[in-house]
Each structure stands twice: as structure tokens, then as C-alpha cells.
């Protein structure tokens, strides 16, 4: 049986076709993450609590490359 998830892209995914990002699908016990350029590729699944901690840490300390990476 195929899984049907609602995938979301970041609002920071860039212009154009918006394929410079990852997508997430929130599930009851985990968050699944995939590369928007290869949606049929692999999926990384992490517990919701781990994903929440990751996002909270990014809000406090943005990646250094975010300010220096050209679009």
C-alpha cells in the first residue's frame, strides 16, 4: 500500500521552481525529510522531538553558509 503524505517545502526554497530545498512530511510520531530535487529518492525519518530540537537550534544559530551561499 502506497503512503500518501502531504509534503511541504521551506519558504526559503528560493525562486523559480523552488527545487533548492528539502521537503518535510509530519507524521504522528516522526518527521520525514526528502530532497526536493529527487522526491522519489530516499527519505530520512526522525522522531518529532529530534526534529523540533533541530529547528529550535537553527532559530538560535543559523548555519554559517546561509549568509554566504550564492543563490
Image: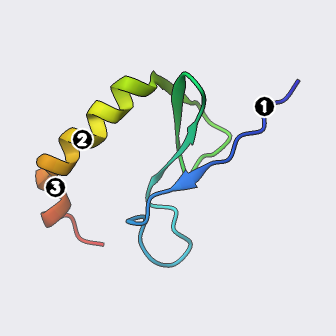
Which of the two discs, 1 and 2, labels the residue nearer the N terminus? 1
User: Which residue is rendered at x = 34% and y = 25% of the image?
Assistant: 50
What distance separates the C-alpha of mark 1 from that of mark 2?
28 Å
Q: Quadrant of residue 47?
A: top left
Secondary element at image label 3: helix
What distance separates the C-alpha of mark 3 from that of mark 1?
34 Å
In the rendered image, the vertical position of residue 20 relative to residue 45, given as above or below: below
In the rendered image, the vertical position of residue 61 relative to residue 20, given as above or below: above
Q: Which residue is mark 2?
A: 56
Q: Residues within 10 Å of mark 1 (few under 14, many from 20)?
A: few
Q: Is residue 3 rendered to the left or right of residue 67?
A: right
User: Looking at the image, which is closer to me, 15 or 8?
Assistant: 8
Choose mark 2 or mark 3, whichever is in front. Answer: 2
Q: Is residue 24 rendered to the left or right of residue 7?
A: left
Q: Which mark is residue 65?
A: 3
Which of the two discs, 2 and 3, labels the residue nearer the N terminus? 2
Give the x, y percent position of residue 36: 55, 52
User: Which residue is rendered at x = 62% and y = 48% of the image?
Assistant: 7
Amino acid at each position: 500500500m502506497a503512503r500518501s503524505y502531504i509534503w511541504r517545502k521551506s519558504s526559503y526554497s528560493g525562486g523559480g521552481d523552488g527545487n533548492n530545498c528539502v521537503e518535510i512530511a509530519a507524521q504522528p510520531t516522526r518527521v520525514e525529510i526528502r530532497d526536493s530535487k529527487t522526491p522519489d529518492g530516499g527519505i530520512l525519518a526522525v522522531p518529532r522531538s529530534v526534529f523540533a530540537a533541530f529547528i529550535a537550534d537553527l532559530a538560535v544559530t543559523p548555519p554559517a553558509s546561509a549568509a554566504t551561499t550564492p543563490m
